[in-house]
Amino acid sequence: MKKILVSTGGGDCPGLNAVIRAVTKSAQHSGEWEVWGSMEALNGVMQDPPDLIRLTDENTAGIHVKGGTILKTTNLGNPLEYPVQQADGSWVKMDITPKLAERIRSLGFEVLINIGGDGSQRISQALWENGLPVIGVPKTIDNDLHATDLTFGFTTAVQIATDSFDKLVTTAESHHRVMIMEVMGRDAGWIALQTAVAGGAEICLIPEIPFDLEKIMETIRERYKTGRGFVNIVIAEGAKPKGGKVIGVRSGNKAEEHIKLGGVANYLRVLLEEAGCPAQVRATILGHVQRGGTPVAFDRILATAMGVKAFELVEEGSWGRMVSFKNNEVTSVAFSEVEKQPKLVNPDHYLLRIARSSGISFGD
Ligand code: F6P
C-alpha cells in the first residue's frame, strides 16, 4: 500500500474534519492507499518518535459534523522560520523545509495533503519545491484567498455571526440602543459584509473602506430623529477610521508574531459616546465563537468535495497544486499561481452595491 500523509495547519475552521474524512473514504475505496495524519500540523512528523495516526473508516466515521480538527492544529513552529538554537545559546530562524521534506519521505509517505490557509500553503509550496509531492487544500473563515471563490468555514462563520446579530437586534430595539458587533476577517471585510446584508444592519464598517465618524453619526442621528430609534452596526476587526490605524496588540507570547486584531468595537463605542451619540452604545466582540461548532451543510459539502478532489489529484499524480472552487466547479491551481496578497472586498463588488441599495451605510 502507498501512504498519504494528511495535516491540518494554522487556525482551525469548521469543515476540516469533513476534508479528512473525504480523503480517507476515497483512499479506502481505491484499495491502493493508506492515509495517515500528522498531529498538530507538521509538528507530528518532526517529533521523534513521530506523532502520527492511521486514519480509517472507523476513526473518521461521522466526523464531518464536528468542528475543529481531529488532527489538532497550531500556528506555531512555521518550518519556513523555525527557531533553531545556536552553539552560543542564541536563537536563529531557519528554513527547515528541506529537512522536513526529507523526513516525510523517509517515513515512507508518497504525498502530503496539506490542509491550511495562506501560511500553510506557503509551506506546501516550499515542500513541493524541495521535491516532496504535495497537494494543498485551502481553508479559512476569512474567505480571503484569490485562488478560490470560496473556502469552507466562511459560510459557517457568517451564519454564526448572523445568528448573533439577530439576537442583538432585539436588545437594541428594546433599549433604543446602538449595538456594535465586531466580527473576524483580518484585513478582509467579507464576514462583516455578508453578515450586514443577511442581518439587515444599518451600518457596516470594513477594512477596505476606512470610516468617517461624522458620517456614522449622521446615520445614527437620522435613525433617532423621532427619539425612539435603534441602530445595529457590524464592524470587521480590521476596520479603521480614515487616516487611522487598526486596533490590535502584539501577543505577550514571543512565538506569536502577528498583531492580534480585536477591540475596534469598543474603540468605536467610545468615539460615538464622545461625539454625543443620542443613545447608549454597547459593543460585542464575537471572536473565536465564529470558528467553533458544527459546520453548516454547505461547508460540509464544500469540504467533502475538496477532500475528494485532493485524492483525485493524488491518483493523477498532479502534484504542486492546491484544490480550489471556481465558478461552481471544484478544480485546482498550481502553487506558483496562488496569489500571496489577500483577496479583499473590491469597491465594485456586487454585494457592496446591493448593501448600499438596501440602505446600509459604510461610514464613507
Ligand atoms: O484567519 C482566521 C482568523 O480567525 C482571523 O479572522 C483572526 O484574526 C485570526 O484568525 C485569529 O487568530 P488566532 O486564533 O491565532 O487568535
Image (spheres, rainbow, N blue to C red):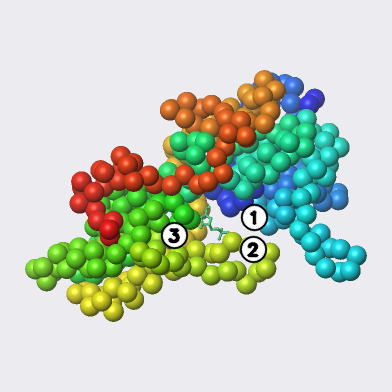
- Structural distance between the alpha carbons of marks 2 and 1: 8 Å
* Residue kind at label 3, given as amino acid type: Gly
Badge 1: residue crowd in 10 Å (few <14, some 14–19, many ≥20): some
Q: CB under 8 Å between callouts 2 and 1?
A: yes
Q: Position of residue 64 (x, y in %)?
A: 55, 39
Mark sitting on residue 124 = none
Name the quarter where the C terminus is drawn. Answer: bottom left
Which corner quadrant of the image does residue 58 belong to?
top right
Q: Position of residue 102 (x, y in %)?
A: 83, 39
Front residue of 351/241: it is 241
151 relative position to 210: left or right: right
Mark sitting on residue 75 = 1
The residue under label 2 is: 256
Which corner quadrant of the image does residue 181 belong to?
bottom left
Badge 3: residue crowd in 10 Å (few <14, some 14–19, many ≥20): many
Q: Is residue 126 visible?
A: yes
* Of the image marks 3 and 2, the number of the one nearer the N terminus: 3
Mark sitting on residue 238 = 3
285 relative position to 312: left or right: left
* Of the image marks 1 and 3, the number of the one nearer the N terminus: 1
Q: Outermost residue toward the left?
A: 226
Q: CB under 8 Å between callouts 3 and 2?
A: no
* Residue kind at label 2, given as amino acid type: Glu
Q: Position of residue 32 (x, y in %)?
A: 74, 22
Secondary structure beneath label 1: loop
134 relative position to 309: left or right: right
Q: Position of residue 84 (x, y in %)?
A: 81, 59
